[in-house]
Image (cartoon, helix red, strand yellow):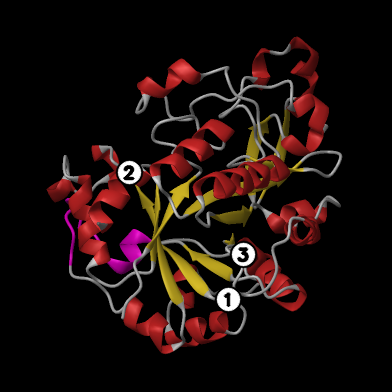
Amino acid sequence: MQKLPIIIAHRGASGYRPEHTLAAYELAIDIGADFIELDLVITKDGVLIARHENELSETTDVAFYPQFVNRQTTKLIDGKTKTGYFAEDFTLAEIKMLRAKERIPQLRPQNTIYDGRFQIPTFQEVIDLVKCKSSQTGRVIGIYPETKHPTYFRSIGLPLEDILIETLQINGYEGSDAPVFIQSFEVSNLKYLSAKTNFPLVQLLNINGQPYDLALKGDPRSYLDLIKAEGLREISNYARAVGIHKNLLIPIDSNGQLLSPTSLIQDAGQFHLLVHVWTFRNEDLFLPSNLRGCPQKEYELFFNLGIDGVFSDHPDTALAARS
């Protein structure tokens, strides 16, 4: 019997609260999400924190602190030039001075009322929340961390992987059945993790581009190459699941309308890989043109294909569709 697909709260209930805040995670848990998803970057003093990017100005008020004005700099991150304020240039104590803000206020103006209210949480604080809420509710709430820019962080002497594993182990997570999925858009660090732990791993796959670590090695394979049989076979040697852009499963045409599904679920199934799909959001901008105003129908369409999980900014909509 097909298990119900898991509902993964993408950066928490980020459709309703500024992303990657304890408030967003707690709301997602209260709504009923099975897993909460968080992106991990690292501070100057080696502490994992929850941010979508190591550049802080898009999701915090860092630019308004005069004492940090000289921290603004330009860096090359994964082959792209970025100017801003970077987590790895701040200690945890300095990070804790900052407050979160809504990342896309033009689309989610209702969330801006929370700007300035919430601190940036550490990975440990997120785990503490999950364990507390699991105890209160009597249900297992999973965590789904992503290692952001792992090759870059390793290159500056702040590798993420061992700290991530150690933090999970200290908190009692162990074994392949732990309520944990560790995800990455890169390949090498997942292979490294697979040699160090048996936590379930997820290879993220986009509709364009290639893993940055492969590009650095001169490996020409793109994400589209990795969804071919040979790529999926390789992934199955180190990962439990693939986390795919939804258009890899159901492409859209030039008018934004859905086309016929691809065979990716069946292809992944041949190598015993779970398929988790990202990212579902309620706003019309993110919906296929023929489903605007009907976000629940998009979930239903994907659920009916037999996927194993969805990443959602609006986990209440996802849960309604699943039920």
Q: Nearer the viewer, residue 315 or 238?
A: 315
> Which secondary structure dominates the residues rendered in magenta?
loop
Q: Amino acid at mark 1?
A: Ala
**Residue visible at 35% across and 42% down?**
314
| Element carrying mark 3 | loop
Question: Horizontally, is 70 left or right of 254 in the view?
Answer: right
Q: From what the image shows, is residue 269 above or below residue 241? A: below
Question: Which residue has dot 1 on it?
Answer: 239
Q: Which mark is residue 186?
A: 3
Q: Which residue is at the far top?
A: 66
Q: Answer whether labels 1 and 2 touch (C-beta < 8 Å).
A: no
Quarter residue 121 falls in: top right
Residue corresponding to mark 2: 316
**Magenta stretch: includes residue 250:** yes
Q: Residue at x 72, y 34 (%)?
A: 86
Q: Secondary structure at mark 2?
A: helix
Q: Residue at x 44, y 40 (%)?
A: 30
- 183 on left or right of 161: left
Residue situated in front as seen by the camera: 254 or 313: 313
Say whether residue 256 is visible.
Answer: no
The stretch in magenta equals 245-259
Whichever of callouts 1 and 3 sits on the residue coming sooner in the sequence is 3
Answer with left or right where residue 142 lies relative to residue 289.
right
* Percent position of residue 25, x then y: 52, 40
Chain-order first, disc 3 or disc 2: 3
Q: CA distance from mark 1 to mark 2?
A: 28 Å
The kind of residue tagged 2 is: Asp
Please state, as top left, top right, bottom left or bottom right, where the N terminus lies in the image: bottom left
Looking at the picture, how far across and down is residue 85, in whole percent? 70, 29
Q: Residue 94 placed where, x, y %?
A: 79, 25
Q: Amino acid at mark 3?
A: Glu
**Could you tell me which quadrant the C terminus lies in?**
bottom left
